[in-house]
Amino acid sequence: MFTGIIEEKGKIEYIKLNSLSARISIYANIVLKDTKLGDSIAVNGVCLTVTDIQKNSFCADVMAETVRKTNLSLLKKNSYVNLERALTPNSRLGGHIVLGHIDATGEIIKKAKEDIGTWLYIKPNKNIDSRIVDEGSIAVDGVSLTAAKTGNGWFAVSIIPHTGAETTLLEKNKGDIVNLETDIIGKYVSRLLNGAEKNIEQKNDISIDFLAEHGFF
């Protein structure tokens, strides 16, 4: 579990793409403190397990499903990524609850400056509109942000200078792909509502003929 508050920007040492999976090595500093083999680190919002640790880097394996669902396969040597260690019991929850499980990728369709802030307009690659609400939380490449604007098949976030300096988001441009994780509360609400709709549909299937056929008349 993570908070979406990025601790540092790491730099890709190498990424080896296999037929389906991948292995990735990342230069880092802050996130290596007190990190042990088997610990979790979020890389661009993706929860990965540390499989090797060197003085200034760590390695992780990326399974086939993760390669398919995230932007990690698009990384190259010297690419920068957002890094965050897993939440501990004494950590402050400065952002929101982030699981490190990506729901969709999104394409940046517009980047616009407004005073000190920068707007990123993002179009998800699948329909997750029901999980995104105005002023609700969403993680973009692992960064806890607010969906300040929403529309049919898109949403927008505003990046303040501090967030821009501490993460990779201001390095993104139109056409770039980012990882998206919607708020866990929104997921549960969406699931409950979908279940209620299905129950209503099932009830609507009950007719006089159905009751007669099953011996109620």
Image (cartoon, grey):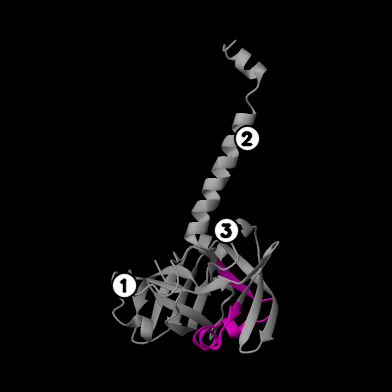
Residue 184 at x, y = what percent?
48, 59
Is 39 on the left or on the right of 120, as rendered? left
The disc placed on residue 121 is: none
> Based on the displayed image, in which of its 4 quarters is residue 41 positioned?
bottom left
In-front residue for pair 206/174: 206
Question: Please, is residue 33 above or below residue 128 in the view?
Answer: below
Residue 28 at x, y = what percent?
41, 85
Q: Name the amino acid type tagged 1.
A: Leu
In-front residue for pair 65/194: 194
Q: Is residue 50 magenta?
A: no
| Crowd rating for badge 3 (residues with CA inside 10 Å; few <14, some 14–19, many 20+) | many
Looking at the image, is mark 2 or mark 3 earlier in the sequence? 3
| Crowd rating for badge 1 (residues with CA inside 10 Å; few <14, some 14–19, many 20+) | few
Residue 134 at x, y = what percent?
60, 66
- Which residue lies under the disc numbered 2? 201
**Who's the residue at 54% across and 42% down the image?**
195
In this rendering, does residue 211 appear at all?
yes
- Which residue lies under the disc numbered 1? 37
Is 166 on the left or on the right of 90, as rendered? right
Element type where label 2 sits in the image: helix
Observer-side mark, 1 or 2, equals: 2
Q: Name the amino acid type tagged 3.
A: Arg
Residue interval drawn in magenta: 158-180
Q: CA distance from mark 1 to mark 2?
A: 49 Å
| Crowd rating for badge 2 (residues with CA inside 10 Å; few <14, some 14–19, many 20+) | few
Looking at the image, is mark 3 or mark 1 earlier in the sequence? 1
Observer-side mark, 3 or 1, equals: 3
Element type where label 1 sits in the image: loop
- Which residue lies under the disc numbered 3? 131
Q: CA distance from mark 3 to mark 1?
A: 34 Å
Q: Name the amino acid type tagged 2.
A: Glu
